[in-house]
Amino acid sequence: PHELSQFAFPPADQAVIEALQREVVKTRDEVVLDIETVQASREEWARLIGKSPTAAGESYPTEGLDLFAAGAAEEQRRIEEELYAKSAFDGTFSRIVCIGLLEFSDQMEARSAIAWYGADERELLRQFWMRLAQDRPTLFITHNGLGFDLPFIKKRSIIHQVVRDRFQVSRER
């Protein structure tokens, strides 16, 4: 059988190896992420779902209808109200007006804070993805980020055809 022996590098070589290891194993970058969104107007929502803008939000006349027809008209109005309310959380119908990042080192030292805001959503998204590609954070800290913020950002990026520069978000810690 072969015996394994431990090989010790000379002190100068050991210092080089340790420097290389520090370079390879960088500190973890943690990012606090939050977005602010606004819902599409009723007219815009109606256009996106294929309804005439004048018909959206109009009350359904029940005068002169029999009880069943009036009930059906009221139910249709209620359904449309519910759909419009839910559209606030859907990137198809709402848009991003602000993206904020607060970057920390693994020792929880604040490194930078940045917010992109304004009417040019495409530019907000482009700047956001460029920053992530540059900094490559390893941990996102969010409130419902995987359930809302990141899917919303992804959908709006697709709509605006903003390339994410191969940055992938993983659920792993």
Image (cartoon, rainbow, N blue to C red):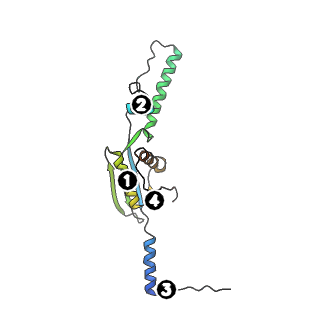
Q: Position of residue 84 (x, y in %)?
A: 44, 33
When the figure is inspected, residue 166 is found, relative to residue 117, above or below; the finding is below
What's under tag 2, amino acid-wise?
A: Ala
Q: Are marks 4 and 3 in contact (CB under 8 Å)?
A: no
Q: Secondary structure at mark 2?
A: helix
**For the point 34% across and 49% down, which residue is it?**
123
When the figure is inspected, residue 109 is found, relative to residue 51, above or below; the finding is below
- Which picture quadrant has residue 58? top left
**For the point 44% across and 14% down, which residue is it?**
63
What's under tag 1, amino acid-wise?
A: Phe
Q: Within 10 angstroms of label 2, few (less than 14), some, or many (20 or more) residues? A: many
Q: Earlier in the sequence, mark 3 or mark 2?
A: 3
Of badges 4 and 3, the one in the foreground is 3
What's under tag 3, amino acid-wise?
A: Phe
Q: Secondary structure at mark 4?
A: strand
Of residues 143 and 149, the one drawn nearer to the viewer in this rendering: 149
User: How far is the residue under mark 3 from the one under mark 2?
Assistant: 71 Å
Residue marked by disc 1: 128
In which quadrant of the rendered image does the N terminus lie? bottom right
Q: Within 10 angstroms of label 1, few (less than 14), some, or many (20 or more) residues? A: many
Q: Earlier in the sequence, mark 1 or mark 4?
A: 1
User: How far is the residue under mark 2 from the one under mark 4?
Assistant: 38 Å
Q: Secondary structure at mark 1?
A: helix
Q: Secondary structure at mark 3?
A: loop
| Outermost top residue | 64
Residue marked by disc 2: 46
Q: Earlier in the sequence, mark 2 or mark 1?
A: 2
User: How far is the residue under mark 1 from the one under mark 3?
Assistant: 44 Å
Residue marked by disc 4: 139
What's under tag 4, amino acid-wise?
A: Leu
